[in-house]
Image (cartoon, helix red, strand yellow):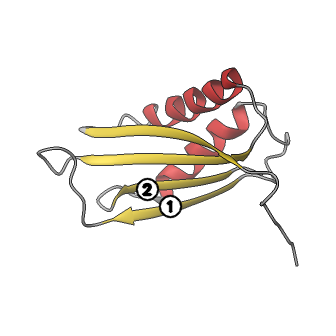
Amino acid sequence: MPHCIIEHSASLKGEELLSPVFQGVLNSGLFTADGSDIKVRGLPYSVYQTGNTNADFVHVTVRILAGRTDAEKQRLSAGVLATINALKLVDCSVTIEVVDIDRQSYSKTVS
């Protein structure tokens, strides 16, 4: 069920970020073993500022249904960070955020 949104500087190849984020979420063990419920998408930014420079950045928001423990969310965050760090990006800020989705207001349909 997780929705993973990768915001990144346009100078990075977004398609190279999709698989590591997917793998980091899958490795957490919090979702289906086949990964069929994991959704990953990228949003490149050509206009941005990172402090006093225009260094590259990657920010991943992992949106999950509420109910996980803080320890589970930390494991998820650390796992995604590890798979991105394995890419050895140079002069790039990488951040991960796990956000709870309110179960009462979440709706889904598959057609």
What is the x, y in percent for residue 72?
71, 26
Find residue 41 and report its horizontal and vertical position in percent: 57, 61
- The reply, left or right, for residue 81 in relation to residue 103 is left
Q: Quadrant of residue 12?
A: bottom left
80 vs 108: above or below: above
Amino acid type at circle 2 is Glu
The residue at the far bottom in this view is: 111
What is the secondary structure assignment of the residue under circle 1? strand
Neighbours of disc 2 within 10 Å: few (<14), some (14-19), many (20+): some
Q: Are marks 1 and 2 in contact (CB under 8 Å)?
A: yes
Residue 70, image x, y percentages: 67, 24
Q: Residue at x 54, y 48 (%)?
A: 61
Residue at image position (78%, 60%) is 106
| Residue found farthest to the front | 104
Q: Residue at x 84, y 45 (%)?
A: 34
Q: Which residue is mark 1?
A: 42
Spatial distance from mark 1 to mark 2, Cα to Cα?
6 Å
Q: Label 1 neighbourhood size at 10 Å, few (<14), some (14-19), many (20+)?
A: some
Residue most extreme to the top: 71
Q: Which residue is mark 2?
A: 7
Front-most of residues 15 and 29: 29
**Which three-letter amino acid code belongs to the residue tagged 1?**
Gly
Instruction: Give the mark, 1 or 2, whose residue is nearer the N terminus.
Output: 2
